[in-house]
Image (cartoon, rainbow, N blue to C red):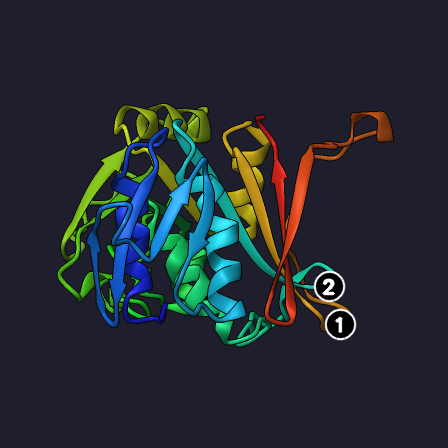
Amino acid sequence: MITSKNIGILLDFIKNSKKNSDLYLLVKKNNISLSSKRESNFYIKNNNLETKINISKFYQSILNILLPILRKNKKLVIAQIGQSIDGRIALNNGNSHYINNPKSIIYLHCLRSISDAIIVGSNTIKKDDPLLTTRKIKGTNPKRIIIDGSLSLNNKYKIFNDGNENIIFTKSKKNIRLNNSRIIRLKEKNFTKNFITHIKKLKYKNILVEGGSKTISELINNKYIDILQFIIAPILIGTGINSLNLKEISNLNKAIRPKNNFNELDNEIIVNLFLNS
């Protein structure tokens, strides 16, 4: 049985396996181990999942979404947005708890667990005060990377009080200390391009960009995002904060029309746009 207690372990096995090889596992309650073909009850063959154990529709959906990402033999930058069907990520007052189904949090933590690093802007920290961990599934935590141009954050936020390391990118010259953090200062001119260049030097394989709207939009405008993923909730909000604010175009011929696919996740839809394919 695949549950929140062992899916993180399962994803680690898949992530660290050879991409072009078949993978045979033995799943028993909360224990997962490598196995022979004959004794296995969970296996990936030719990048297709086959199993002899019971998997709920929800966890089957998670594996269907993440398996193609995990089996790619290339670096990927994935931006993830949870939004209403009319494209809002929050009310105008910043309230965003909760637009998406609570089960989407489990999926998000699975997505974090397969990522080596997670990028967010300072506004996401201020509004949501997240930990950016995989605590819902007991997975591997990604390295936290925060874009804080004006160095406006302080030690009251959770990420500075749990002992896990942060990397803060800024263009500010303020002399402040943030707990368990390394501050990297970049030139103000071409800040986003300089940030992307520096991140590439860190050699992370999978990077997740989790917000907010400004950060994701800037990175799309700079052609840094490989997969743009929307978790779309079947609710209408009306006025609110847009999920994206991309640079204006003057003709629909210039609209981005990427390859795409979609999956169901409980009562929501996940849409993947392959921007750099």
Q: Residue at x 27, y 62 (%)?
A: 27
In the image, is 9 to the left or to the right of 4? left
Q: Is residue 66 above or below residue 179?
A: above
**Which quarter of the rendering shows the N terminus?**
bottom left
* Residue 213 can be seen in this image: yes
Q: Which structural element holds mark 2?
A: loop
Q: Earlier in the sequence, mark 2 or mark 1?
A: 2
Marks 2 and 1 in Cβ contact (< 8 Å): yes
Q: Residue at x 56, y 70 (%)?
A: 94
Q: Amino acid at mark 2?
A: Ile
- The local crowd at label 1, few if under 14, some if 14 to 19, many if 20 or more residues have their Cα within 10 Å, is few
The spot of residue 131 in percent (x, y) is 30, 65
* Viewer-side residue, 147 vs 117: 117
* Residue 171 can be seen in this image: no
Furthest-front residue in this view: 38
Q: Is residue 7 above or below residue 66?
A: below
Q: Amino acid at mark 1?
A: Leu
Q: Which structural element holds mark 1?
A: loop
Q: Residue at x 32, y 45 (%)?
A: 14
Q: Residue at x 53, y 60 (%)?
A: 61
Q: How many marks?
A: 2
**Residue identifier under label 2:** 85
* Viewer-side residue, 32 vs 165: 32
The spot of residue 97 in percent (x, y) is 52, 76
In the image, is 33 to the left or to the right of 124? left
